[in-house]
Image: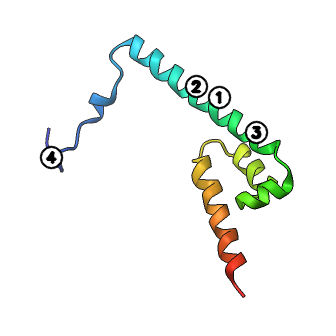
Amino acid sequence: MAYLLSGERSSATAVIKSPLVGLVRWFEKSRKARAQKLALASLLELEDFRLDDLGISRQDILDAVENPDRNVGAHLAARRSRRARSWFRY
């Protein structure tokens, strides 16, 4: 089998060989998802003026909750920076 790059591996190496490893990965994934849900819930509990201080709106958080597949942190950071750019314009 020929590889294009020296560090490239075949897809067969990504297969989980141990059920225990798969179980640990599943627990880690569910732990991260739970932590993200708790963080978003705590953001939703903040007052509107505090969210405005952070540079995000309640709708930004609700959009992030509706699309959990994408990176929520990057999504909120992009919304915050877009608001900051529009705030600095004269």
The picture places residue 85, in percent across and down from the top left corner, at 65, 75
Can you identify the residue that label 3 sits on?
42
C-beta proximity under 8 Å, tags 2 and 3 = no
Instruction: Give the residue displayed 85% in from the left and 55% down from the top.
Output: 48
C-beta proximity under 8 Å, tags 1 and 3 = no
The picture places residue 68, in percent across and down from the top left corner, at 65, 42
Can you identify the residue that label 4 sits on?
6
- Label 2 crowding class (10 Å Cα cut-off): few <14, some 14-19, many 20+? few
Q: Quadrant of the N terminus?
A: top left
Q: CA distance from mark 2 to mark 3?
A: 17 Å
Q: How many marks?
A: 4
C-beta proximity under 8 Å, tags 1 and 2 = yes
Mark found first going from the N terminus, 4 or 1: 4
Closest to the camera, between mark 4 and mark 2, is 2
**Amino acid marked by disc 2:** Arg
Q: Is residue 28 left or right of residue 16?
A: right
Q: Secondary structure at mark 3?
A: helix
Q: Secondary structure at mark 1?
A: helix
- Asked if residue 32 is positioned above or below residue 52 in the image, the reply reads above
Closest to the camera, between mark 1 and mark 3, is 3
Can you identify the residue that label 1 sits on?
34
**Amino acid marked by disc 4:** Ser
